[in-house]
């Protein structure tokens, strides 16, 4: 999504530009995640690129929340329409990127040994592009099929009548479980911590509705521009305490019945900022779960105990809770037990007293998510001006200026980098803005004869401190989630890290426009 648009913009500047892509083809997120149920949480028509009217008018979305194959078709359509493929090299994974002080550019080494040089290095490497596997003993000995959702195999995975284990209950698992519950023979869902999920309410877009949407794209994108998250859903302006409990409840009923992230992002602001408001809304959603899951014990296990609604990313679901009403779908809680190992025939649990239980399965799906936001950066050895490795600099968390650059790494420009606005929003909206801003920066440099851009250490310290302050305003500061950089499957990521800008996209856009107008305050050119 990001690399495609950046390529398009740089070609408009007549730049000599090449996209290096590790995968075999275009699509990034939408090339890889092919598991059943994979689809948008963003309304399709708010997710597509906004830069070309012609593109907007010629593309029809079939559903309000399109599934992965459609999005992949869309991205291929964009690439072909603007003839971008010839500027892309696939199967080209960058392993090291070293700044060369003599030329002021970057020297890249790829996984196949090729070496390239470039002047500017722009990263469009994704925030959810580095999958993480758990570390159980015996994983290699399993005799059935086992894979991460990100690596869902191309050859058809036979699920009908099969015994399937799903490990994890994050956003991906929630989509997957709703999609396969009916078909499988037995489904064992291994849950360590429950998540607050909410109904997606997807539906098809008939041609007349698509025509109306096409006619209102200006309004749709303007609405996205006004909201903190770049979605069409913005927070309710009323104060929580000024709305009577009875009216709050009626409003919440309406939100729960609404499509997409309305229930999360269209709620009262206080729900994400104030413990009491959050507790009240969490209790409302807990009752919804109880109402949808027949077995009271299972329902209680599906209600999170360790965090309130919305302080972690809310998985959107279609029939997720109802899946547990099927006799062959079993929620296996890891609250009091843990996975001891993977055996050749399945999954073995053990309790604190040493009692074990085996679950025999044919397929194991690891729905264990991503090393979010910094994972793709950690997988490239970036070496900056004084031989400093980015991995060392960011060992305890990233530090950047605006999420665009990090000190000591000149001419390295991060497009959807940590601590920018693109990592906490409806991505394409923020990505288009980040790409436009970076393109203007390069244009500014070319016009002014500058060869080198870097950020000052002071600007970086100030921005990183600001990022931390913004976390303190929101309840998400306490959550163990990728918003706080937590991932127990990655060594060193069991600490809080400050990865996202929580000030909202409109504020971010205003700020970076002012900085650009002020001769790029905080940046140093040469
Ligand atoms: C299942 C799923 C559902 C999602 N749903 C939504 C949604 O509804 N709405 C939303 O806004 N966002 C969603 N996202 C987030 C999604 O990642 C972004 O919307 C968007 O795809 C980001 O685009 P990108 O180009 O920045 O990153 P990506 O799509 O991740 O692309 C990054 C590319 O960089 C390549 N790359 C990485 N490292 C290297 C390297 N070292 N060398 C060469 N190439 C490299 C990768 O192979 C990949 O192709 C979802 C993510 C997932 C995983």
Image: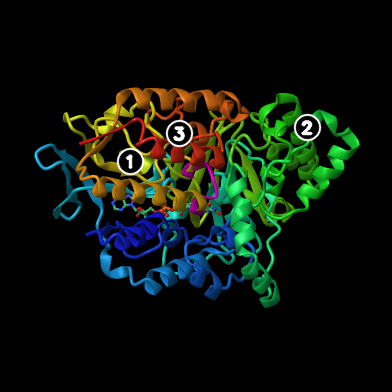
Residue wearing tag 1? 377
* Marks 3, 2: nearer the viewer: 2
> At 44% from the left edge and 35% from the top edge, which residue is drawn?
419
> At 74% from the left edge and 37% from the top edge, which residue is drawn?
268
Q: Is residue 145 left or right of residue 328?
A: left
Q: Residue 26 location in percent, x, y?
A: 37, 64
Residue wearing tag 2? 239
Residue wearing tag 3? 499
First in sequence, mark 3 or 1: give its number. Answer: 1
- Cα distance in 3D space between marks 2 and 1: 40 Å
Which quarter of the rendered picture does the N terminus lie within? bottom left
Decide whether the magenta segment is chiefly helix, strand or loop: helix
Specify whether residue 185 is in view.
no
Q: Quadrant of residue 517?
A: top left
For residue 85: magenta? no
* Marks 2, 1: nearer the viewer: 2
When the figure is inspected, residue 415 is found, relative to residue 185, above or below; the finding is above
Residue range highlighted in magenta: 422-428
Which quarter of the rendered picture does the C terminus lie within? top left
Residue at the outermost left position? 102
Q: Quadrant of residue 41?
A: bottom right
């Amino acid at each position: 999504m990001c690399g495609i648009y950046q390529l398009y913009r740089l070609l408009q500047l007549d730049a000599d530009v090449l996209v290096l892509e590790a995968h075999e083809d275009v699509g990034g997120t939408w090339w890889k995640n092919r598991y059943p149920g994979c689809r948008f949480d963003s309304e399709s028509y708010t997710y597509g690129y906004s830069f070309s009217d012609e593109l907007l008018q010629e593309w029809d979305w079939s559903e309000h929340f399109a599934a992965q194959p459609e999005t992949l078709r869309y991205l291929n359509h964009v690439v072909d329409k603007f003839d971008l493929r010839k500027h892309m090299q696939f199967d080209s994974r960058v392993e090291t990127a070293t700044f060369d002080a003599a030329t002021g550019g970057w020297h890249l080494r790829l996984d196949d040994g090729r070496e390239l040089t470039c002047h500017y290095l722009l990263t469009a490497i994704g925030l959810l592009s580095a999958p993480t596997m758990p570390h159980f003993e015996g994983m290699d000995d399993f005799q059935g099929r086992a894979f991460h959702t990100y690596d869902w195999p191309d050859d058809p995975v036979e699920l009908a009548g099969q015994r399937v284990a799903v490990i994890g209950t994050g956003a991906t698992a929630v989509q997957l479980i709703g999609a396969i519950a009916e078909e499988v023979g037995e489904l064992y869902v291994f849950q360590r911590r429950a998540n607050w999920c909410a109904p997606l309410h997807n539906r098809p877009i008939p041609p007349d509705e698509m025509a109306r949407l096409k006619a209102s794209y200006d309004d749709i994108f303007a609405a996205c521009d006004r909201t903190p998250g770049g979605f069409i859903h913005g927070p309710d302006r009323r104060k929580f305490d000024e709305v009577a409990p009875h009216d709050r409840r009626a409003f919440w009923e309406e939100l729960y019945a609404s499509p997409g992230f309305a229930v999360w992002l269209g709620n009262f602001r206080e729900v994400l900022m104030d413990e009491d408001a959050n507790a009240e809304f969490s209790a409302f959603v807990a009752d919804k779960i109880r109402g949808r899951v027949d077995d009271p014990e299972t329902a209680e296990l599906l209600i999170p105990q360790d965090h309130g609604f919305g302080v972690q990313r809310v998985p959107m679901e279609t029939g997720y809770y109802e899946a547990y009403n099927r006799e062959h779908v079993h929620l296996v809680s890891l609250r009091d037990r843990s996975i001891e190992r993977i055996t050749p025939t399945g999954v073995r649990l053990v309790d604190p007293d040493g009692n074990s239980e085996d679950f025999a399965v044919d397929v194991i799906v690891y729905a264990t998510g991503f090393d979010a936001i910094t994972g793709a950066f950690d997988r490239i050895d970036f070496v900056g001006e004084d031989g400093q490795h980015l991995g060392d600099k960011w060992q305890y968390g990233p530090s950047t200026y605006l999420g665009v650059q990090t000190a000591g790494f000149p001419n390295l420009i991060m497009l959807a980098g940590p601590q920018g606005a693109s990592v906490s929003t409806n991505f394409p909206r923020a990505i288009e803005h980040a790409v436009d801003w970076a393109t203007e920066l390069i244009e500014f440099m070319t016009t002014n004869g500058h060869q080198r851009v870097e950020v000052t250490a002071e600007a970086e310290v100030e921005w990183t401190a600001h990022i931390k302050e913004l976390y303190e305003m929101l309840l998400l500061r306490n959550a163990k989630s990728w918003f706080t950089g937590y991932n127990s499957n990655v060594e060193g990521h069991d600490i809080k890290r400050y990865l996202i800008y929580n000030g909202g996209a409109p504020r971010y856009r205003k700020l970076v426009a002012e900085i650009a107008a002020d001769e790029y305050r905080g940046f140093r050119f040469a």
